[in-house]
Image (cartoon, coloured by chain):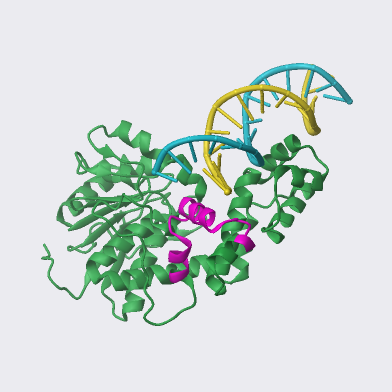
Chain colours: A green, B cyan, C yellow
DNA sequence: TACTTCATCCGCCATA
DNA sequence: CTTATGGCGGATGAAG
């Protein structure tokens, strides 16, 4: 196997199977690819593997993924082996050939990682026994039940236990890969990748992303949509339930109920999201003082803005600004530290979804 | 930081 | 009878 000295190439292999989730596959691989792109050299050699080398349908069957390799032809030396999640994780974890191959390769790889409920498939090898493992919080209970001898920690984004890594849902897989890149290529490059990713995810299209993120939460019920527009256009105003209800000629009770039915979230959560987004944009795109931004975004006092930011994003307003204000060379890009277990602090990259935070 | 105050939100239920 | 409304009270948690 490969010693860990300075190498000029590092093979990353992603295991694919029918019903795999595209997000779990693409997110992490894009991170590795981006690291290559930014560093200007093809350090990561990325391969994808299916059992027979034929294409597999992703979950939902709206896309076929054609792998670079079959089990037999897969590189002998896989440095980092990744197992993605997907709705078909059960079937995959009961596939003898697949689990056998995974076991052999995992034993030879220097680093093995699961994304989301890919943890079930990796756990089926038995190699995770006694290891600390995480998965999407929805599946944590089931994972612990199915594999009593592994230590499930649903509360963290991702975990490293020996050479085995595991991550929670969606973007947590990307956070995990960023930590790997940091190990392999150093912190500055990892942060640069994060920066590119976040800028892309967070502000691609400028104004567009602002509404894009919220678009999904906009209702098609005219009365509710009007209220939502009013909130988005006037985040700094008094948006108390009573006032909004008067504005909409409803009782407060009806407003709360209809809003939740139509928008899928409470009025308060919606307002908080809008205000945080607004404050973020002001931090990014204006040089205004924090106090003023707190007022303009409807977050009130500076102290309160700080609290709300901690709750929603996991960083202070000042930190957020230093990370996102315009591209200046030599700018420091401090994120929360990648601790030894990576579990002490949520990386804010994945913290935009306040909902899942709460349920953890 | 701890504490107080109070808006929010929801279950329950009477009402339209 | 079914369905939407809205008042009431209490638990929760946010703001200051």
Query: Which quadrant: the N terminus of chain A?
Result: bottom left
Left or right of A228 on screen, residue A30: left
Q: Position of residue A267 (x, y in %)?
A: 66, 45
Residue A64 placement: quadrant: bottom left
Left or right of A134 on screen, residue A59: right
Q: Is residue A280 visible?
A: yes
Q: Main secondary structure of the magenta part?
A: helix
Q: Is residue A48 visible?
A: no
Residue placed most toward the observer, A57 or A308: A308
Query: Which residue shows up at 24% across the image and 37% down it?
Result: A150
Residue placed most toward the observer, A293 or C12: A293
Residue A130 placement: quadrant: top left
Query: Which residue shows up at 59% across the image and 56% down it?
Result: A299
Left or right of A198 on screen, residue A292: right
Q: Magenta segment range?
A: A295-322
Query: Which residue shows up at 19% across the image and 53% down it?
Result: A163
Vertical position of residue A146 compared to residue A165: above or below: above
Q: Position of residue A261 (x, y in %)?
A: 68, 39
Residue placed most toward the observer, A344 or A80: A344
A331 part of magenta stretch? no
A310 part of magenta stretch? yes
Q: Position of residue A57 (x, y in %)?
A: 45, 54
């Amino acid at each position: 196997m490969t010693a860990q000295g300075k190498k000029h190439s590092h093979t990353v292999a992603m295991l694919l199977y029918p019903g795999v989730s595209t997000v779990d596959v693409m997110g992490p691989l894009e991170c590795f690819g981006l690291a290559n792109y930014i560093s200007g050299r093809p350090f990561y050699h990325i391969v994808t593997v299916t059992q027979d080398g034929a294409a597999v349908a992703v979950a939902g069957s709206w896309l076929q993924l054609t792998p670079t390799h079959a089990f037999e032809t897969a590189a002998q030396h896989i440095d980092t082996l990744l197992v993605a999640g997907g709705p078909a994780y059960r079937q995959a974890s009961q596939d003898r050939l697949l689990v056998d191959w995974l076991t052999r390769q995992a034993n030879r790889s220097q680093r093995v990682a699961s994304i989301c409920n890919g943890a079930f498939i990796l756990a089926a090898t038995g190699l995770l026994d006694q290891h600390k493992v995480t998965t999407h919080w929805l599946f944590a209970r089931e994972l612990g039940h199915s594999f009593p001898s592994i230590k499930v920690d649903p509360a963290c984004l991702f975990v490293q236990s020996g050479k085995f890594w595991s991550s929670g849902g969606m973007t947590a897989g990307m956070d995990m890969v960023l930590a790997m890149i940091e190990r392999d290529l150093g912190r500055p490059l990892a942060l640069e990748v994060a920066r590119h990713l976040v800028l892309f995810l967070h502000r691609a299209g400028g104004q567009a992303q602002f509404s894009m993120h919220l678009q999904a939460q906009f209702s098609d019920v005219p009365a509710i949509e009007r209220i939502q527009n009013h909130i988005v256009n006037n985040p700094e105003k008094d948006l108390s339930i009573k006032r909004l209800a008067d504005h909409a000629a409803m009782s407060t009770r009806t407003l709360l109920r209809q809003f939740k039915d139509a928008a899928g979230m409470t009025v308060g959560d919606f307002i908080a999201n809008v205000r945080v987004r607004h404050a973020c944009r002001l931090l990014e795109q204006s040089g205004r003082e924090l106090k003023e931004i707190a007022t303009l975004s409807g977050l009130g006092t500076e102290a309160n803005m700080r609290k709300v930011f901690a709750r929603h994003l996991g960083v202070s307003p000042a930190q957020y600004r230093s990370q996102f204000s315009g591209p200046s060379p030599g700018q420091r890009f401090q994120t929360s530290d990648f601790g030894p277990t990576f579990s002490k602090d949520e990386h804010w990259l994945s913290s935009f979804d306040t909902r899942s935070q709460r349920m953890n």
